Each structure stands twice: as C-alpha cells, then as structure tokens.
Image: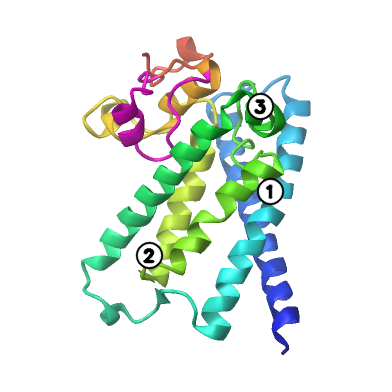
Amino acid sequence: MDALPALLLSALAMTLIVGGRYLVVSGGFAMLTAWRFPGLYGGQRRQIDREIRWSLASAAIYGVPAGIAAWGWQARGWTQIYTDAGAYPVWWIPLSILLYLFLHDSWFYWTHRWMHRPKLFRVAHKVHHDSRPPTAWAAMSFHPIEALTGAVVIPALVFLIPIHAGALLAVLLVMTVMGVTNHMGWEMFPQWLVQGRAGKWLITASHHHRHHREYKCNYGLYFRFWDRLCGTDKGLGEFDHASRDPRASRA
C-alpha cells in the first residue's frame, strides 16, 4: 500500500478509536454518576450536547498525530515502542510509565497556564470552561487550538523515549480515566487517599474541580508537583453537592 493512503487510513482508524474510547468511557462514568448521584447533571442537557460535539471534534485532531505515530511504528519502525519485554531491563517498564506521565503532566501544566492568558483564554480555552460545572462528558471538550496542544505530546514522546507497548497502553488508560473522572463533579476515590499523603501529590476530582470554580489555580493533570512548586496549588475544593456527598473534599 502506498504511504499516503496508509497514513490517512491510520489517522482515520485512530480517530475512530479515540472517539469511540471517549464515548464509552465518558458515557460509562456518566452512567455511574447518574446511579451515584441521581439528577446531578439535571438541567445540563444543552451543555452536555455541546461537550460531546467539541469532544468528537477533538477526537479527530487527536487521531491525526496518533495515526502518524501508529503508522510510523508499524510500517517504518520510526518510534521507540517495543514489544519484546526483554529489550530493556524490567524496571524500565514502570519507570517509563511514570516518566511519560510526568512529562505529559509537565507539558499540560505549562500549556494550561499559557491557555489562561486573557487573549488565548477568550479565543480557545473558554470552550472548556464553558462547562460550568463540568460533567463526565467534558474531558475532551476543547477548542481545536487547545486540542492540538494536547494531541501532540504522547505521539511525540514515542518517537523519543523507549516504551513497551503494554506500558504505553497503561499510560493511555491513566490519561483517559483521569481526564474523565477529574471532571465528573464528585470524588470517586476514597477519602483516605484524597486527603492522605498520596493526595498531597496526586490530582483527583476534588483538586481539579476547584480549578473550574476559581480558574487561577490547580493547573496540573496528574500530579500536584508543578502547582506546589510554582505556588498555584490552592488545595482541594468543594463540590456543589458537598452536603450530599460524605466523600467530597473541603479546601
């Protein structure tokens, strides 16, 4: 098969995968929310419809660099993705997962702060913050400019840093689950984790929800490292329905 048709087919396939993944995961957590907190998303039908439209558009943007990376791996061997677990020391597998997550988190933190500059916020990032309060469908609700900044990071890393295919799937799983659960409006994780030692460094819905309420704080994605280092961490937030949720965290 000629390179260009194969590349386009790979981009299309990855777009369908990203879009399908979004619908399944966000839809699943939306159903869980409806069971856990009936009526929590009441009155937000129009917002959810908008979140789904923006997210499916973002899926197409994410699909292009992902498709290029997948084609480069399979057809040209250009990437650093490997399938032989013995190609690198076993300890590299968990370390590579942490490294990818840290680098992704670092990219996200700084581009996210950049998106909060007044002009960029009005042009692009406002789309994401129009979800007030966010729902499980808001994880990929981005303007195309913002979607592009998020779409390039993991595909770029696979060209630079060796990672086992299974470890890459683990990174994508964490990225998908945390992206959805951090927006769904309630805390899925137990209080002992959120308010314990691990919670001082990991971001969950309690932390990210405060960003959506106050804007100028809590910019991270997975870890609170950059927020704490740069003085932008304002701690855990309170959900709008905190009085009904015994696990909701307070600042």
Q: Is residue 151 left or right of residue 104?
A: right
At x 70% / y 44%, what residue is drawn?
144
Q: Quadrant of the C terminus?
A: top left
Dot 3 amino acid type: Lys
Q: Position of residue 154 (x, y in %)?
A: 49, 58
Of the residues tagged 1 and 3, which is closer to the observer? 3
Tags 1 and 3 touching, CB below 8 Å: no
At x 36% / y 29%, what residue is drawn?
227
Note whether residue 202 is visible: no
In the drawing, what numbered circle is on residue 119?
3
Dot 2 amino acid type: Ala
| Label 3 neighbour load within 10 Å: few <14, some 14-19, many 20+ | few
Q: Residue furthest top?
A: 243
Dot 1 amino acid type: Ser
Q: Position of residue 96 (x, y in %)?
A: 31, 61
Tags 1 and 2 touching, CB below 8 Å: no
Main SS, magenta region, reads loop
